[in-house]
Amino acid sequence: MNVAMISYHTCPLAVLGGKDTGGMNVYVRELTRSLGRLGIHVDVFTRSQDEHIPSVSHDLGYFNRVVHIPAGPETFLPKEQLVNYIDVFTQGIMAFAQKKNIVYDLIHAHYWMSGIAGSILKERWEVPMLQMFHTLGLMKQRVGRTTEEREGDYRVDGERDVMKAADRIIAATEAERAQLEMLYGVNHLKISIIPPGVDTRHFYPIPQDEAKEAIGIRADDRMALYVGRIEPLKGIDTLVRAMAHVKKNCVTFTCPDYLAVIGGDPDASEEDMSAEMRRLQSLCQELGLDEMVLFLGKRGQNTLPYYYSAAEVLVMPSHYESFGMVALEAMACGTPVIASRVGGLAFLVQEGETGFFVPSQDPQALAEKLRIIFIDQSLRKRMALNAVNYARDYSWELITSQVADVYQDLVSFEQGVPV
């Protein structure tokens, strides 16, 4: 089977924590690798953002490829500008397929702009199309606190068009399926629920002293961890304020030495630094946390297991998460998770067993859960063991077999039902 995987706005080989890089990058990369082990050939098409990198990369193994298609300036562009180049991108995919004389049996698109390209290719190639949105515009509009955080109507309209064109939609959770049905009117028969997976051969518990040595901290240092994009919807400001509460009250227990924040570019120039990074750094100065909060910037997937294993806890104080793959990676490494009860996190974290839930935007509640984790080491160890066992149910081998079953259904002319 030949699959055209479309990841228009972000490359699956990009380093986690950069602009527009996150769980979707990991999902596309790891699913493609796992599909290769099943003998399914995948070409991942993404927009070229660097004219100096090879147009075709075989880094995904099993003869599967990442194909960089020039579409507009070969540099990073904000999403509102990317819409203008979808047609050029789509033409580039068709030209590649014709040049390589390859016929695709299926299109698997990720995020709504990829779905726009996929719907054009679906009609041209007369093949079925599978769609995964990863985030939904209407949900971001609901939780966004400022105009900058909310998506324009052009995205919601585009999502509706893609939902009509897709033969099947993968939702990560029951909550996402309910959002597709209630907010967009998608027929439930068109939706398959398959969560993202985790590579348990890569993410596994490393002895904490070894992990700390690998990332360069002392054996007796204790660390909380955040991993992800630096944007307001992630609620990092709530975590910073919680650390201020913890620091103020740690005379009664062993205070954590660090909050390590992985993501973004903290060393960028003033003009290039994101507004959220500037805001968070200013907040740390205001609260006297300059030496306690470490902005580490981007980190590669190869080093993340060491950070997870070295940390006492991973914190995800998001206002919205479609799933929360970072939480799953941390749990696979034996790290408890404190998270907001939003989106996929509400299904992923097991309260009191693998971590804790806290109300969104409540620094004091988050500080209390952090205090418990740092005080009660027996509880932390029990949560760590539970987390590892729980994460095994999300191994990519299990998840990919479910995706492959959907592929087979679609290729066998099960074309779904109309919206």
Image: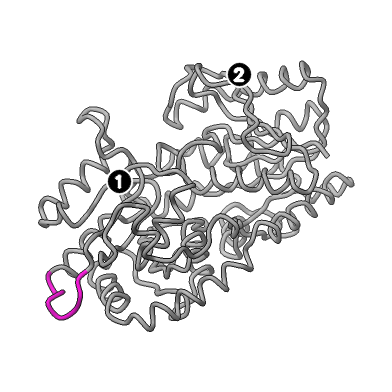
Q: Residue at x 69, y 49 (%)?
A: 34
Q: Position of residue 203 (x, y in %)?
A: 53, 58
Secondary structure category for the residue under label 2: helix
384 on left or right of 29:
left
Farthest residue in the right direction? 412
Seen at 29% across and 72% down, the residue is: 370
Secondary structure mainly formed by the magenta segment: helix
Q: Residues within 10 Å of mark 2 (few under 14, many from 20)?
A: some
x, y percent for residue 398:
70, 61
**Amino acid tagged 2:** Val
Whether residue 238 is visible, yes or no, is no
The amino acid at mark 1 is: Leu
Question: Pointer 2: what residue?
Answer: 88
Report the mark closest to the observer, 1 or 2. 1
Identify the mark at residue 26; answer none if there is no mark: none
Apparent side of residue 318 relative to residue 371 in the rendered image (left or right): right
- Nearer the N terminus, badge 1 or badge 2? 2
Residue underneath mark 1: 296
| Spatial separation of the CA atoms under disc 1 and disc 2 | 36 Å
The stretch drawn in magenta includes residue 251: yes
Please say if 104 is above or below 144: above
Q: From which residue to which does the magenta span run?
A: 248-255
